[in-house]
Image (cartoon, grey):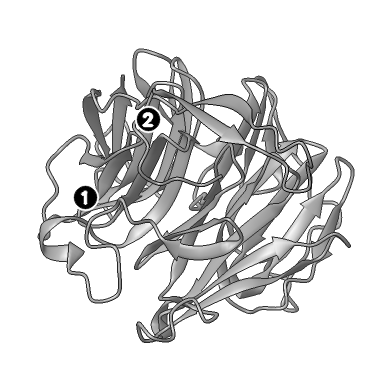
Amino acid sequence: MYVDSLIPNTTYTAQAKITNDTAQNWKEFKITTLATTSHNFTWQTYEFGDYNPSALMDVTIIDENNIWAVGKIYLNDSLGHSDPNNYNAVHWDGQKWESIKIAGYGGWACRTVLAFSKNNIWFEGTIKWDGKNYTVHNNGFPLLPNGDGWMINKMWGTSSNDLYALGNGGNIAYFNGKSWQKMESGTDFSLTDIFGSSNGNIYSAGSKFSEVKGIILRKNQSGQFETMVEGDMVSKEELFHPKLYGSLSSVWVDENNVIYTAGNIMYQFKNNRWDYVKSLPENYIGGNPGTYYRGYIGSVRGNASNDIIIAGDRNTLKHFNGIDWQQLGLPYSASSDISWGSIAIKGNIVVAVGNQGYKAKILMLKR
């Protein structure tokens, strides 16, 4: 049964019968819809950086007293001189943010972080923090022909023995706890997000931004990634037959295994078909969200289908409570130079990371 006009947190009574039941007996059953979640977040912003453009690119929440964000932060040393080795992580202990050089030396931009627990945190695919020491796990990690290694944009997994890392050029690698194995993706797009569903499917999003093209990959039953849908500069008449419109930067799956992806436009894959997320204003080809509502969507995450966050440029930071979307933190502005690169939500904690001008920026929200 699919009804799109039910009221949240309400119990409905329905009747059904099996069509080949000669007795024609109707069975009565009850359906209770999900409640809405609260838009009521308190928030605080933090900035980092003394010189050179600083930015934060990814964030992971362990609990309200243990949060990691990564990127590149250029700070002055104790004498006020520019430190040549930038910091590439910050850690929240419940009271303050501490700037950190991963593995003790820094000097490079870390693009992704993933925590399974407080003593099991992964940076940039191959670096693991156990709460006391860093160890490098690069056995078999795929390298480009020139030996430089490939840029890692995102990680996802269920444990340290089931970990995926992906990057530019369609690169995907899998770590089984002992060694890395390169996985074929069939694309050369820059892969920027990955997420797994409760039914065992794994999805990845990627784009060719210069051509306004996108792709969603799905891991098939044989264990290989294949193209699920592509995005391109299609017309309204061509949309969903079979392509989506535009770039696709993020992918997330809710508790009902509905797939959400976003970039220029936000879509969902539900009841075996793609469609707009119709609750999001101006979210269609020909809509005009930029002036009044939102910019490009770079990250989608949620707790459930009634508790979703989107983040992007122009200070786009919206929460869906099951009925409508509301801007969080500072008001949206089409002229804002705040760009949120990644978002994380866990329970009633939300953390957005990105940059504003030359400063790295964090917005922490609590509900």
Front in this rendered view, residue 139 or 160: 160
Q: Position of residue 254 (x, y in %)?
A: 55, 41
Residue at disc 1, secondary structure: loop
Residue 85 visible (yes or no): no
Q: Tell me: residue 234, above or below residue 29.
A: below
Q: Which residue has dot 1 on it?
A: 315
Give the alpha-carbon distance from disc 1 to disc 2, as whole Å. Answer: 15 Å
**Relative to residue 161, is residue 33 drawn left or right?**
left
Front in this rendered view, residue 81 or 29: 29
Name the kind of residue labelled 2 in the image. Answer: Val
Residue 6 visible (yes or no): yes
Which residue is painted at 43% across and 72% down in the image? 247
Residue at disc 2, secondary structure: strand
State which quadrant residue 363 falls in.
top left
Check residue 293 in the rendering and tell me which mark sits there, or answer none. none
Q: Position of residue 166 (x, y in %)?
A: 65, 59
Q: Which residue has dot 2 on it?
A: 350
Q: Tell me: residue 43, above or below residue 18.
A: above
**Relative to residue 362, is residue 337 drawn left or right?**
left
Q: Residues within 10 Å of mark 1 (few under 14, many from 20)?
A: many
Which residue is painted at 37% across and 37% down in the image? 6
Q: Position of residue 123 (x, y in %)?
A: 61, 42
**Relative to residue 152, is residue 108 drawn left or right?**
left
Which residue is painted at 21% across and 56% down in the image? 294
The numbered mark, 1 or 2, whose residue comes first in the sequence reads: 1
